[in-house]
Image (spheres, rainbow, N blue to C red):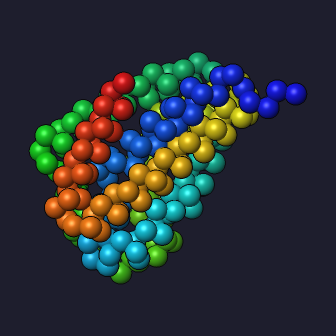
């Protein structure tokens, strides 16, 4: 019995690329992690990288339920829209990198009392980005891989979250060292995520 599909590697690569991009793109969740790191240190903030594993469950279930019931031609349209959305994200990331903006406007108004994984998950759950990202980009890829062979979809999902959690942890650790080092390194990670989205 063949356990590993020959088509698995492309899905693993896509999971890594999009997981890294999701972790390093400026947004409410990333700003929340950075601010909490600057306020209370990396040790207390580090467990919050697990928040997407809690918040993305309902989001992913809802998106896959919808995608699984729509006609194939509509999924193809969503894939085209997803490609356009990725281009938009790449342009936004490039503009953010050019303007030295690593923390989005309004991030300073986030509540400072949110210091648990569940509160971080709530920040992510109320963030529109995961809904758009899973609906237009990673959701169709995951569904296509699953239909080819379940191991393809599972490997893509595992690669996505392992990379995302690791990249978020890296951001927290770097900002925990010094703010200056974290800012410069985050700018580099933003540039890398822009290149990843553009390819």
Which one is in front, 187 or 75? 187
Q: Quadrant of residue 154?
A: top right
Which quadrant would residue 84 be assigned to in this image? Answer: top left
Please indicate, yes or no, whether residue 135 appears anywhere in the rendered image: no
**Residue at the outermost right position:** 1
Quarter of the picture holding the N terminus: top right
Residue 23 x/y as whole percent: 39, 49
Residue lying at the far left in this picture: please name it. Answer: 99
- Residue 15 spot, x, y in % from top left: 52, 37
Residue nearest the viewer, comparing 176 with 121: 176
| Residue drawn at 38 percent across, 41 percent down | 21
On screen, residue 120 versus residue 32, left or right, reads right
- The image shows residue 130, relative to residue 5, as above or below, that is below
Above or below residue 128? Residue 156 is above
Residue 162 visible in this rendered orientation of the protein: yes
165 lies above or below 91: below
> Of residues 70 and 93, which is closer to you in this image?
93
**Which residue is at 33% across, 39% downward?**
193
Expressed as whole percent of the image width and height from the top left, the position of residue 189 reads 29, 45
Q: Which residue: 33% across, 27% down?
A: 198
The vertical placement of 26 against 11, above or below, is: below
The quarter in which the C terminus is drawn is: top left
Residue at left offset 53%, top offset 49%: 161
> Does residue 172 appear to the left or right of 164 in the view shown?
left
Number of marks in the image? 0
Question: Which residue is at the front of the view, 88 or 99?
Answer: 99
Q: Point out residue 112 in the picture as x, y percentages from the top left corner.
A: 31, 78
């Amino acid at each position: 019995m063949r356990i590993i599909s020959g088509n698995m590697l492309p899905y693993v690569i896509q999971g890594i690329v999009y997981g890294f991009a999701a972790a390093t793109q400026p947004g409410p969740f990333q700003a929340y992690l950075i601010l909490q790191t600057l306020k209370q240190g990396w040790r207390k903030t580090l467990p919050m990288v697990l928040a997407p594993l809690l918040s993305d469950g309902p989001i992913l279930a809802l998106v896959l339920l919808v995608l699984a019931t729509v006609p194939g031609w509509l999924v193809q349209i969503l894939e085209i829209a997803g490609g356009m959305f990725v281009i938009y994200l790449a342009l936004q990331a490039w503009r953010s990198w050019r303007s030295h903006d690593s923390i989005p406007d309004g991030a300073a108004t986030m509540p400072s009392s949110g210091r648990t994984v569940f509160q971080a998950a709530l920040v992510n759950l109320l963030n529109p980005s995961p809904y758009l990202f899973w609906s237009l980009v990673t959701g169709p890829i995951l569904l296509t891989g699953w239909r080819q062979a379940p191991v393809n979809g599972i490997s893509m999902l595992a690669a996505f979250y392992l990379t995302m959690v690791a990249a978020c942890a890296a951001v927290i650790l770097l900002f925990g060292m010094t703010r200056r080092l974290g800012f410069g390194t985050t700018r580099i990670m933003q540039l890398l995520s822009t290149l990843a989205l553009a390819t």
